[in-house]
Structure formats: C-alpha cells, structure tokens
Amino acid sequence: MKIALITGATSGIGKATAEIFAQHNIHLILCGRREDRLHELAQVLSKSVKTTTLTFDVSNREDVFKQIESLPDEWKNIDILVNNAGNAHGLASTDKAELADWEAMIDINVKGLMYVSKAVIPQMVERKTGHIVNLGSIAGKEVYPNGNAYCASKFAVDALNDGMRMDLVQYGIKVTAINPGLVETEFSLVRFKGDEEKAKNVYKGLTPLSAQDVAEVIYFAVSRPAHVNIADVMVLPTAQASATVVVRK
C-alpha cells in the first residue's frame, strides 16, 4: 500500500492530484486549511482508497510538526510527499507592493514547503525510500515585471528542489519539480484578492492548463519505475511559450 501526503488538497492542483492518486489506489493524507473541504473530499475519495485529513497552515511551523506527528502509526510511512500548497499575493511593482504580501508568499511558498518536508523526510531517510514532488512555477525559471517576491519564492523552490535531490539521492529518495505555466485554478482570484474580473482576464483569449492536466503529470512522475526519477518538468499551455510570451485570440 502506497501512502501520499498532499498539501493544499482542498482545491486546484492538490485536489486534482488527490483524485488521480485515488484512481490508482494510492492512499491519501489530505492536508489544508479548510477543514470542511478536506472532509468533503475525504468522504468522496474514501470510497476508493483509505483517507485521513490534517488541518493546518503550512506557514505555521509548530502546527505542521504537531499535526504530522499526530498521524497514527499506520499512516506514518509516507511514500509520496506532494508539496503543493502555495499562494501569490498581489501583482504590484517593487516600489508599490505591500510588505505583508511579500511575507505571506515567502512564509507559505518557501518556509511552508521546508517545514512539511522537514517533518516527513526523516522517515523516508530511515526507510531509504520515498518520493518528494515540489510544485514550482514558470515564475521560478523566469522573472517577469511585477513578479518580484512571488518569482523570488518560486526561484527558492527551484533551488530547494535541486538541493533536496542532491542531498537525498544517497538514500534512494526521488525528488521532482513540476513547474506549470498558466493554470486556471483559484490562484489568480487569490492573487487579485477576490477581484473576479481581473482573475478572468489572466486566461482571456487562450486555453490555459487545467488542474487535471498538471495532476496527470504529477502522477506520471510518481509512477515511473524505481530506477527512473523525473527531476524537473515545465508544463505550459500550447498558447504560452514563456512567462511573458502568450498568444491570445
């Protein structure tokens, strides 16, 4: 029986990944801040696989360790960790950006990933097996105007992914980066702080990736044979060539 822990499982890529994992008999530890959504998803997926839920904010170090340590013994041997939780706050230039937005992105996208990884990795090292999937972004490969702290946070994820892979290869632990381009989820709505019109305009005139598209790539990576590690993948909609080159009709 394989067990996967997925952060940010209440919506978007995290939810889609949980759904595709359940279709392939991977048992699930669903993590997120919205307890009602977690329980609703667990109820649906428990018809296919074993599920349990943990409610925490990845940026709260104490709570991350407390919740993961609280797992019953039968859930402690996590085979797959999907570090999916992340956020973008605002899209303002460096001189106009709010410091609170910058701090939130660093706390969630970087420190949150580090906290969850640090809580899960020791048992993988002990068993000399495991697979860590880190959700990055095209913003971790290219900086774009007004991206500032968000791009910085995703560049940090890219570096952490490479560092983890180098440090953990001696234990047989795989580490994979998945870097999507434009994906239509709640992401833009959060970035524009609830402004639905601005969020819709991000995807106007093109067909963006869906959460399901990215989840399928994640499953492909974790389902490779033991001797194969998909180290770093960029996934773009056909209409996107780079962070700033997008064709709209």
Image: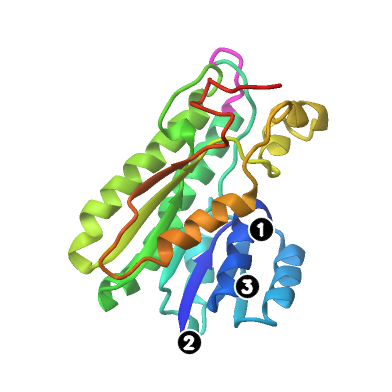
The foreground one among 114 and 167 is 167
Q: Is residue 198 positioned above or below 72 on the image? A: above
* Kind of residue sitting beneath label 1: Arg
Residue that extends furthest to the top in the rendered view of this protein = 95
Residue at mark 1 to residue at mark 2: CA–CA distance: 23 Å
Query: 244 or 46, which is in the foreground?
Result: 244
Expressed as whole percent of the image width and height from the top left, the position of residue 167 reads 22, 55
Report helix, strand or loop for mark 1.
loop
The residue tagged 3 is 53
Task: Look at the image and say whether residue 217 sits in the magenta stretch.
Answer: no
Residue at point 28% right, 65% down?
173
Q: Secondary structure at mark 2?
A: helix
Residues packed near mark 2 inside 10 Å, few (<14), some (14 to 19) or many (20 plus): few
Residue at the outermost bottom position = 74
Q: In the image, residue 73 lies at what x, y percent?
A: 46, 86
Amino acid type indicated by mark 2? Glu
Quickly name the residue at label 2: 74
In this picture, which residue range is highlighted in magenta?
94-99
Instruction: Determine the image quadrant of residue 37.
Output: bottom right
